[in-house]
Image (cartoon, rainbow, N blue to C red):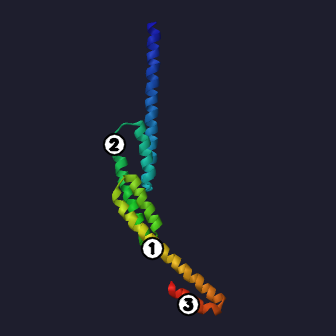
Amino acid sequence: MKNLMFLVMIIFSIIITGCGNNSQKQVDKLEGQAEQYVKQNDYTNAIHKYEEIMKLSDEKQYQSKIDDLTQKQVIKLEREAEQYTAQSDYTNAIQKYEEIIKLSDEKQYQSKINELKAKDEENEKDINLVNKILDELKNVLKNPDSLKVNKVIINRL
């Protein structure tokens, strides 16, 4: 009976040791994938890999890596938002600032979003006005006799 109990304990310890090695292999694999993403400046996917590692390992070093990569991603998104703003592409700039808020929970970007939304609305009004004028000009070209009537309409715009 003692021999059987001893055999069961040995098998049990082998299973536990094997599972630990498997878990470490998985952590190493995920860490390698994360580092590849970092080299490609794909911080979002790198963060996701480190978050997967955190589920398998309770080591604090991975949380500091996540925090560092989150900050790098925020900086990257800020640059992209600024580039879109410089190109007057306010929709994409707003999207980048919203990503920053989701990622870092920093509310300071909400004022930038509100400012860009106002600019975007102004651009939309300008575009609508130009389209109305173009439509009127097309009508004039089709029917030159209506020029007097259209001149009044254009003056109102």
Q: Nearer the viewer, residue 124 or 146?
A: 146
Kindly indicate the quadrant of the structure image that contains residue 60: top left
Q: Which residue is mark 3?
A: 151
Kindly indicate the quadrant of the structure image that contains residue 72: bottom left
Element under label 3?
helix
Q: Which mark is residue 103?
A: none
Q: Which residue is mark 1?
A: 122
Which of disc 1 and disc 3 is earlier in sequence?
Answer: 1
Element under label 1?
helix
Q: Nearer the viewer, mark 1 or mark 2?
A: 1
- From the top left corner, tell me how far across and down residue 121 is, in percent: 46, 70
Q: Which mark is residue 61?
A: 2
The image shows a total of numbered marks equal to: 3
Q: CA separation, marks 3 and 1?
A: 25 Å
Cβ–Cβ below 8 Å for labels 1 and 2?
A: no
Kindly indicate the quadrant of the structure image that contains residue 141: bottom right
Q: CA separation, marks 1 and 2?
A: 48 Å
Q: Nearer the viewer, mark 3 or mark 1?
A: 3
Q: Nearer the viewer, residue 85 or 145?
A: 145
Which of disc 2 and disc 1 is earlier in sequence?
Answer: 2
Q: Nearer the viewer, residue 152 or 96?
A: 152
- From the top left corner, tell me how far across and down residue 31 is, in percent: 43, 44
Which of disc 3 and disc 2 is earlier in sequence?
Answer: 2
Residue 62 in sight: yes
Element under label 2?
helix
Residue at 53%, 86% in the rendered image: 154
Q: Nearer the viewer, mark 2 or mark 3?
A: 3
Residue at 44%, 32% in the rendered image: 21
Residue at 54%, 89% in the rendered image: 152
Residue at 44%, 42% in the rendered image: 52
- From the top left corner, tell me how far across and down residue 6 is, in percent: 43, 13
Q: CA separation, marks 2 and 3?
A: 72 Å
